[in-house]
């Protein structure tokens, strides 16, 4: 039974997303240099089960098969990332032609199939030589990023639909340099805030470099992961403000308004004096972008710690070393367990958080078009006796979030598209291969791909451009 089909407007783009280190494998082939994720994953104790991205989905060698899968699904756009260490193995200096050739084939394969390439320059695989010189805590990394942007734009700018500078700089800065659960595994709160600034600067310098040299007519963007916080008791509103400053406005402030929020600077005064922000930096960072990418998975519930007993830190990551999770005043924020259903990551399922986020962003930045560049869920998929994978929980998750996006459109949000994370099961960072986000299953022994029920569902959604409300009893 189908009730109330909800049609998406013409021009709304349906896509799916991946990232280089999570799917490519071929980590030592064709001149690719080491990245911080190679170093981190090969260091015992960092990743579940000692998993690495050495082989991953072997997408590097299976590109054509994966392109055919995308065409079969009817994807209108594919969001992928370029591995900086394949293209400039040293981070700066010599360009590796084999790396450029590889992405050139990928882009041509997409265009031949009518799929729009949405390319992210940086999805966390920093060339190790740059980390050896200080990584994102150092200004030189932002400058190196601008050089890398020039190289990729000269090679691909005529064929790219949308350029995205960074994926989730929040994760790079705080998980990589503060909490240490992502590469490079540093636990230095001051370095995390320096990384925030140098990532912002990289976005600004990178966007300018892409624009200066473009031969085609690409759109420019950045993708942020926003924290959608709900109040969870005493001091809930103040806790929300602190998280919003550090997680969200630390990026949207400089990128979209050309300033760091005053409350962010106050909240972190015990950690850093922000002297790494030089005169003129904020003008470099603030660049008009055609679309703001939004990654959304879940909400958090917060309150201020009352100082009694152990702090609760149910913020969706591996446990942090005491005191290093969030720098400054946000250290006193407790993340409470969430009521209701959750995914295999332990993240609660809250589609209303997506609507609220999109509405809030369009209120804060009225003329800024938005795009959901990631949304999806990990579940413990079961392969049936006949080889089929009935991942109805994932389909339900996606359906409810598509409806939430549709609600945002009804409320006047200028939302241009939606990308399911992820096309393939893949290397889920510190969780290794233990968490499966794909709508396509990957058997990590045989590397065989199988469409899950959610992939068949998504194919029908794209073909009909509509999502139905009540046919499965949700909502
Ligand atoms: C993304 O990161 C990555 O871009 C992608 O590579 C990764 O595979 C994928 O998601 C799945 O993990 O979101 O409010 O519940 C996700 C980063 C940020 C998600 C913090 C969980 C916890 C707070 N994460 N978040 S909330």
Image (tube, rainbow, N blue to C red):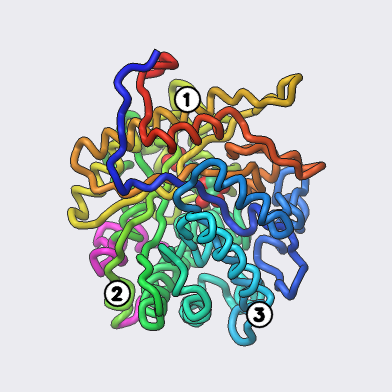
Label ID, residue 282: 2
**Residue 372 shows up from this direction:** yes
Nearer to us in this view, 336 or 59: 59
Label 2: how many Cα within 10 Å (few below 14, some 14–19, many 20+): many
Q: Quadrant of residue 443?
A: top right
- Contact (CB < 8 A) between labels 1 and 3? no
Residue that numbered label 1 is attached to: 396
Residue 5 x, y percent position in the rendering? 32, 25
Circle nearer the N terminus (2, 1):
2
Residue at the limit of the structure toward the right, as seen here: 445
Say if 423 sits above or below 467 in the image.
Answer: below
Label ID, residue 307: none
Q: At 58% across and 60% down in the image, what residue appears?
A: 109
Q: CA distance from mark 2 to mark 1?
A: 42 Å
Quarter containing the N terminus: top left
Nearer to us in this view, 54 or 197: 54
């Amino acid at each position: 039974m189908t009730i109330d089909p909800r049609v998406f407007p013409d021009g709304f783009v349906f896509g799916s997303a991946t990232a280089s280190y999570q799917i490519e494998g071929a980590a030592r082939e064709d001149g690719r240099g080491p990245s911080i994720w190679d170093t981190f994953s090969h260091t015992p104790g960092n990743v579940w089960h000692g998993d690495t991205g050495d082989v991953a989905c072997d997408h590097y060698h299976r590109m054509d098969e994966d392109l055919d899968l995308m065409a079969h699904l009817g994807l209108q756009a594919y969001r992928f990332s370029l591995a900086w260490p394949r293209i400039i193995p040293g981070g700066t200096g010599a360009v590796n032609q084999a790396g450029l050739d590889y992405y050139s084939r990928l882009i041509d394969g997409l265009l031949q199939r009518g799929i729009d390439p949405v390319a992210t320059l940086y999805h966390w695989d920093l060339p190790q030589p740059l980390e050896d010189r200080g990584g994102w805590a150092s200004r030189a990394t932002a400058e190196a990023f601008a050089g890398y942007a020039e190289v990729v734009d000269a090679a691909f700018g005529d064929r790219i639909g949308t350029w995205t500078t960074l994926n989730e700089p929040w994760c790079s800065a705080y998980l990589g340099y503060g909490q240490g659960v992502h590469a490079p595994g540093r636990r230095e709160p001051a370095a995390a805030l320096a990384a925030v600034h140098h990532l912002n600067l990289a976005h600004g310098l990178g966007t300018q470099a892409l624009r200066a040299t473009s031969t085609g007519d690409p759109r420019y963007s950045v993708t942020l992961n926003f924290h959608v916080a709900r109040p969870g008791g005493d001091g809930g509103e103040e806790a929300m403000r602190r998280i919003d400053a550090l997680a969200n406005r630390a990026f949207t402030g400089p990128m979209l308004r050309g300033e760091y929020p005053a409350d962010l600077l106050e909240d972190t005064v015990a950690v850093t004096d922000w002297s790494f922000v030089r005169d003129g930096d904020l003008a470099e960072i603030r660049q008009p972008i055609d679309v703001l990418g939004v990654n959304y998975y879940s909400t958090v519930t917060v309150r201020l710690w009352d100082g009694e007993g152990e702090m609760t830190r149910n913020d969706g990551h591996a446990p942090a070393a005491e005191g290093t999770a969030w720098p400054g005043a946000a250290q006193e924020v407790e993340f409470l367990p969430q009521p209701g259903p959750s995914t295999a990551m332990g993240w609660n399922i809250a589609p209303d958080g997506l609507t609220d986020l999109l509405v809030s962003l369009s209120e804060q930045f009225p003329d800024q078009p938005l795009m959901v560049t990631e949304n999806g869920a990990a579940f413990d998929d079961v392969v049936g006796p006949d080889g089929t994978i009935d991942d109805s929980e994932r389909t339900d998750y996606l359906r409810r979030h598509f409806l939430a996006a549709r609600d945002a459109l009804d409320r006047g949000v200028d939302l241009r598209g939606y990308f399911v994370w992820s096309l393939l099961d893949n290397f889920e960072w510190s969780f290794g291969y233990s968490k499966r986000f794909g709508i396509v299953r990957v058997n990590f022994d045989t590397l065989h791909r199988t469409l899950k029920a959610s992939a068949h569902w998504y194919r029908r959604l794209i073909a009909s451009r509509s999502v139905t409300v009540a046919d499965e009893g949700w909502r």
